[in-house]
Image (tube, rainbow, N blue to C red):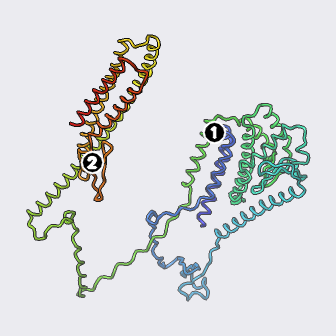
Amino acid sequence: MMDWLLDTLLWTAGLIALVLLIRRPVARWFGPQIAYALWAIPALRLLMPPVELPAWLNPAPQEAAPAATFAESGSTEAASGDFLFTIVQPQAPAATLGRLDAAPGLLMPTTPMPILEIGISVWLVGAALFLWLRFAAYFRLRRELLEDAREVGRYGRVRLLETSGTSTPLAFGVVDPVVALPHGFMAQADITARNLALAHELSHHSARDLLANMIVQPLFALHWFNPLGRYGWLAMRRDQEAACDARVMAEKAPEERAVYASLITTFAAGPKFALAAPMACPVLGEKSIIHRLRSLKMSNMSSRRRIAGRVMVGAAVLALPLTASISYAEGTVPTAPPAPLALGAPLPPAPPAPPVPPAVLQAAAIEAIDPGASEEQREAIEEEIELEEERFEADVERAEERAERAEERMERARERAHERAERSRERARRGQTRSIQIRRSVETNGRLSDEEVEEIMVDVRLGLAEADAAIAEAHREIKLAHIDIKDATTKVKMKCRSGQDEPAEVVEHGNGRTTVYLCQAKVMAKALEGLREAREALADNAEIQGNLRSQLLETLDEQIRDWERTNQS
């Protein structure tokens, strides 16, 4: 613990000094907000816990010095308990030693003063007193400001109070955020200056500056005796105000910047407050005001510079573990080896041998093989097992190929069905157009011309030819399905089942097997049914008369007789 305190003191002092050196160049190149962020580095180093490494990483300890030997003359020192004894060997004559000339030596106990422990105790007591005084002053100020305060508005959680305890706008409070204002501040005539002052104090609350002021107090309390602690705190507050100014003045017009600068100088004579954020921030005298006025020119940094500054601060924070206090875990004391046996002593009996574990069953042992079978029989059985496995894998591959072919065939069938549907719609459109032409021709001429009758018959014959092709394709698909569906659990029968209404019907049995009945006659029966319905509709159509009607009915009757002969065969 003591080593960690001393390491933390030294490292934080060095980091505070480093930030004091680079804060102005950083503000000039990367902006005031990046310069203010630098103070997070020493604050985070204060929170860095000690790192304990394993004992095996500890360098080899130095061997202890051999015991001091008593010389014939001179003196040596030996430690005993909590006392330090100085062993003095008499060399002087008896006259010099007086009555002690007969003593061979004299043990003189001495106790060294614990200077280090006393110094650390004083240091920690001073740090605690520093924190008590700083926070006591803050809470006393808060009580005085709130004693006769009058609330004049709210901004979110922040209360706006007018009080006689301050002459400048002042932000304070973390749990209960408050902006204290002088009496009559909200009623002043210069609305622009009033709004800018309020924006400054509200920016302190939104950026958690008051919380940051309280968090860093232990850092500067550890350096209560060090001038770096005092100047570091004042410089951090100045950077905090400059960063707040940059946030408020971001993207502001030059006229508002001029008003804001005069506002800073107007409140420059305000009082000093502990842990609060007054508009004036009169730390380090007039230099603070000059620094803030110069920082107003740095508020419009390019985004590239701001990103580079954030990366720089982030890299410094990530490198902080390199400064951690390192200690080593205590190593285990090796046990002493057993004493060697005396010469001639009988050796202890050897321990019994461990039982031999049973042999692991091989995969082939799962098969029921006769233990008395010969080696050739075993090999024949193993070969048969391998053949069965190969046949099984081949069956699986064939089934997968059949499934892929069936999927491709279904896709082609869907495409052909889509094409047939398109052709059907096209024929329907032509039929509607033809019907209109027939009606107009009949109304005009009383009959259809021979050319018109021939065109209609050509369309009818083309439609019947397409129907023949569709039926032939359906028969071919049934035969291919008979090949692809066939497997160990599915049985395909090219026959019509009693009561079957569709061309294909699947029957599942209770033993997990399936039978597929493919009935080609049903395909033709469906086609015949559709063709007969078409003939009946044509026969009932009174608009078609004369030669055209007789030719159409004759063509359809011939096609029906042809399909009936095909279905019976």
Numbered label attached to residue 61? none
Is 271 on the left or on the right of 15, as rendered?
right
- For label 1, the residue is 306
Q: Residue 563, image x and y in percent?
A: 26, 32
When asked about the image quadrant of residue 431, the answer is top left
**Residue 216 pos. (x, y %):** 69, 55
Which quarter of the rendering shows the N terminus? bottom right
Q: How many marks?
A: 2
Kindly state the secondary structure of the residue where label 1 is placed.
helix
Asked if one can make out residue 214 in the rendered structure from this viewpoint, the answer is yes
Q: Position of residue 397 (x, y in %)?
A: 24, 47
The quarter of the displayed image where residue 307 is located: top right
Left or right, 257 with respect to 94, comes to right
**Numbered disc in front, either 1 or 2:** 2
Name the residue located 76 percent from the left edge and 31 percent from the top edge. 253
Q: Position of residue 376 (x, y in %)?
A: 8, 62
Q: Residues within 10 Å of mark 1 (few under 14, many from 20)?
A: some
Give the residue at x 65% y 37%: 29
Specify whether 533 is left or right of 248.
Answer: left
- The three-letter code of the residue at mark 2 reads Arg
Q: Residue at x 69, y 66 (%)?
A: 124
Report the disc number at residue 497. Answer: 2
Position of 257 relative to 109 (above/below):
above
Decide which of 369, 263 is in the foreground and name it: 369
Looking at the picture, does residue 340 appear above or below residue 184?
A: below
Q: Upstream in the sequence, badge 1 or badge 2?
A: 1
Residue sitting at 43 percent across and 74 percent down?
333
